[in-house]
Amino acid sequence: MIHIRPYNSEKDYEAIPRIWEEVGWIKRSEALDVTANSFVSSGRALVAEIDGTTECQVSSMPGAMRYLETNIRFSGVTAVATGYVARKQGLAARLTARLVAEDTAAGIQVMGLGMFEQGFYNQLGFGTAPYTRWVSFDPAQLQIAAKARIPKRLTSNDWEAVHAARLTRMRGHGACILFPPDVSRVEMIAHSGFGLGYYDGVGGELSHYLWMMSEGNESGPYTVQWMTYQNGAQLLELVALMHTLGDQIRLIRLKEPYGVQFQDFIRQPFRFQILTSEGKFDNNNQADARQQYRICDLEGSLAQTHLPGETVRFNLALTDPVSAFLDDDIAWRGLSGDYIVTLGPESAAVPGNDAALPTLKATVNAFTRLWLGVRQPSYLALSDALSGPPELFAALDRVLRLPVPEMDWDF
């Protein structure tokens, strides 16, 4: 018998780390058992029982997403985990759909997640974000005029300061923050990383740092799991700090910082790509898209959309696939319906249809990608569920000239 219910910190205390270990996320320890349950308790969490035993868990955390200059109410799906005995029962999809509905009812406007494979979360209305670029380089080959000061060492005991700095970091279009500090705490403990940083905040707070993980070899490779800074000068100091590690470390892997073409900092990048090709210390650039977004509150999201330039109005015939996964007891049924949409300096979406306006047909997945600026609308229509007259796409191409969105937070 399957029973879906909210997470219970006492009843599910042992089950959460057990499931996480089964899916390969952690190696259990007393500290991680405590941290995992604190993590789940920090947001909204649901579980599914099979014959009285918890076998599936989903959770989210509240935060904010930057849309141009506006912060939109955001929620990140931070865990979807199904134990071995509960596979192929449809529990992950059912619980995640319920999580979307409950977060929406609580006022969340946009949700995001990291996907294990493209396709699964598409059926719940999530659309794929742009590529994230990863750069692998020998830090000795960094060329930068800035000089790094002596940094402070950071450990997992500094999780509160580390998280506070993540919340105040420089953010571009599409970048997200998650409010509960436990999201940083569990990441720092689970991956046994270390940090180097600087306390340049107005009140002496941690301002910019690298949080890194080593594969265990003194020469690397090392991965910068995330880096935090509040301005360009701090970013340059962190690049200079990585350069100081080049006497020992032969490879650092880094997610390219927002707005920066990291190759600009690397001396002879193509020479070292050739010299290190196919080896353990392969210098290369890679790109993939492993995160997804979906609009949950269309009217609320568009009310906070302020685009420069002209205004375009159209009918939107929207379909939301999440409805197929919502149990009958859930009042919210997704966003399927007809809307009149205005995009411009003042944007809006209201239910209805105006025969005088052109019509755009879209899934919520595709419309979310269009609204965020994942791709130019006329080209997005080539690969996603988006259709309408050419004149409408030409107008949308002009209006939605947005920076490429970057979530800039892995969860």
Image (spheres, helix red, strand yellow):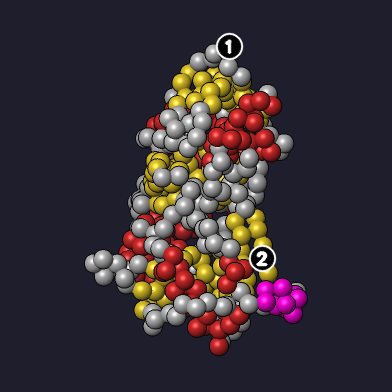
Q: Are marks 2 and 1 in contact (CB under 8 Å)?
A: no
- Specify the farthest residue to the bottom: 247
Say what secondary structure mark 2 lies in. strand
Q: Is most of the magenta stretch helix, strand or loop?
A: helix
The amino acid at mark 1 is: Ala
Between 136 and 358, the one lying in front of the other is 358
Q: Does residue 15 appear anywhere in the picture? A: no
In the image, the segment drawn in magenta is 268-277
Question: First in sequence: mark 2 or mark 1?
Answer: 2
Whether residue 202 sits left or right of residue 194 in the image: it is left
Q: Does residue 233 appear anywhere in the picture? A: yes
**Residue 237, percent across and down?**
44, 74
Find disc 1 in the rendering and name its residue. Answer: 355
Which corner quadrant of the image does residue 139 belong to? bottom right
Between 143 and 19, the one lying in front of the other is 143
Based on the picture, tell me whether residue 391 belongs to the magenta stretch: no
Label 2 Cα crowd, 10 Å radius (few <14 / some 14-19 / many 20+): some
Say what secondary structure mark 1 lies in. loop
Residue shown at the point (45%, 29%) measured from the top left: 347
Disc number at residue 337? Answer: none
Residue shown at the point (42%, 69%) measured from the top left: 233
Disc number at residue 285? Answer: 2
The amino acid at mark 2 is: Asn
Between 201 and 411, the one lying in front of the other is 201
Residue shown at the point (29%, 67%) measured from the top left: 201
Based on the picture, tell me whether residue 270 belongs to the magenta stretch: yes
**Residue 215, percent across and down?**
57, 76
Q: Nearer the viewer, mark 2 or mark 1?
A: 1
C-alpha span from label 2 to label 1: 49 Å
Image position of 151 with respect to 302: above or below: below
